Amino acid sequence: MVGPGGGAPLENANPLIYRRSGERPVTAQEEDDELPDSIDDREIFDILPGGEGRRVRAGHGGYSAFLNPAHLIRSINDPEHPLTLEELNVVEQVRVKVNDADSTVAVEFTPTIPHCSMATLIGLSIKVKLIRSLPERFKLDVHITPGTHASEHAVNKQLADKERVAAALENSHLLEVVNQCLSGRS
């Protein structure tokens, strides 16, 4: 099987496809713009659908940052298949850890095969989505689920290095590929 755009053969031509978890119900408290709303793991995995944005705690008691509801890590596109990371079980809500009080977000992702060459690109796409979506106060940790990838240590080291991430995003071709992963499927 040939890859996207007629490129190299797919590494995982027949991946397992999982059912999407569905949209989460919206509570009255979440709809009330007057109430403060902290960020949690559920919100990182699936930020509320609809509306113009969510008002969230910006830190030190302020409530000024807005999350765009289009920013969902569950809906990030796989770079190799016409499927989302959720549909491939690469990201799961149980692997998202948020500590709003400490302003930390940790996301583990699981490549579909142990030697996936797209692991760094997938991790970079998740990290960019979070950088673009969350208030600057958050410290982000995006890494491979332990024991699921042959080059786990090297990929995690790249994703944790701010300078390497910044340099990668200065590469116009790589940035275009990341943006394709973050754009909606047509």
Image: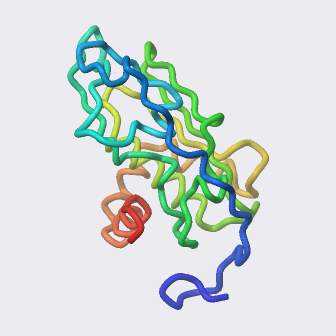
Q: Looking at the picture, does residue 34 appear above or below residue 107?
A: above
* Relative image position of residue 38 (x, y in whole percent): 39, 18
Q: Looking at the picture, does residue 178 appear above or below residue 166?
A: below
* Relative image position of residue 121 (x, y in whole percent): 51, 61
Q: In the rendered view, does 126 fall on the left or right side of 134? A: right
* Quadrant housing residue 7: bottom right
In front here: 52 or 126?
A: 52
* Relative image position of residue 59 (x, y in whole percent): 30, 15
Q: Which residue appears at 53% of the width and 52% of the height?
A: 123
* Quadrant housing residue 81: bottom right
In front here: 167 or 131?
A: 131
Q: In the rendered view, does 152 fall on the left or right side of 134? A: right
In front here: 86 or 97?
A: 86
Colour scheme of the picture: rainbow
Q: Which residue appears at 60% of the width and 43% of the height?
A: 143
Quadrant for the N terminus in the image: bottom right
Q: In the rendered view, does 59 fall on the left or right side of 40? A: left
Q: Residue furthest right?
A: 147
Quadrant for the C terminus in the image: bottom left
* Relative image position of residue 25 (x, y in whole percent): 48, 32
Q: Which residue appears at 63% of the width and 68% of the height?
A: 117
